[in-house]
Image (cartoon, helix red, strand yellow):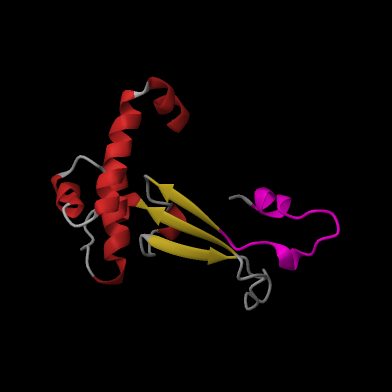
Amino acid sequence: MEAVQYIKELKKSTSYIDLKRTIGVLIADFEIDILKDLNFHTQWKIIENNSRKMVLTEDFELHIIELPKIRNKQADGKDRRLLEWLRFLNNPESREVNNYMENNENMKKAKEKLNTMSKDETLRRLAE
């Protein structure tokens, strides 16, 4: 959700404190130059520009995921489930993803929905 939509939650005479936690996710199918030395998944918050010590709010974050950086990553440890889903997004037809689906019922359901959507021209256009 972009910042404008985040602020649209406010009604007249309500406080910024009333805003709900919002997390934006950007999934890039390319590497972002300024992030080249960072991990495939980075988390960002709004910080004060001069001192760079004070975070404005804990309720607004942006997560950036760069798909090319996952290609040689091992799907184990704390990032395992996230990597499995990212590989699904990157190529739901791969043998690796089919192996993940054996132990992940939600991924199986997502693949079925994707197949259904792929057959429906109107849904395909909406998804694009």
**Looking at the image, which residue sits at the far right?**
13
Give the quadrant of the C terminus: top left
What is the count of numbered marks? Answer: 0
Residue depicted at x 36% and y 64%? 39
Q: Residue at x 47, y 50 (%)?
A: 26
On the question of residue 87 being in view, the answer is: no
In the image, 62 versus 93, the foreground residue is: 93
On screen, residue 58 above or below 32: below
Percent from the top left, x then y, of residue 20?
Answer: 64, 62
Q: Does residue 1 appear anywhere in the picture?
A: yes
Q: Indicate the position of residue 80 as horizontal and vertical percent values.
A: 26, 64
Name the side, left or right, on which 58 lies relative to 27: right
Report the side of 62 relative to 35 (left or right). right
Left or right: residue 40 versus residue 7 is left
Of 35 and 66, nearer the camera is 66
Q: Residue at x 37, y 46 (%)?
A: 30
* Residue 42 locus on image (x, y percent): 44, 63
User: Which residue range is magenta in the image?
Assistant: 3-22
**Residue at 23%, 61% in the rendered image:** 73
Can residue 1 be found in the magenta stretch? Answer: no
Q: Is residue 103 above or below residue 54?
A: above
Asked whether 54 or 116 is in front, the reply is 116
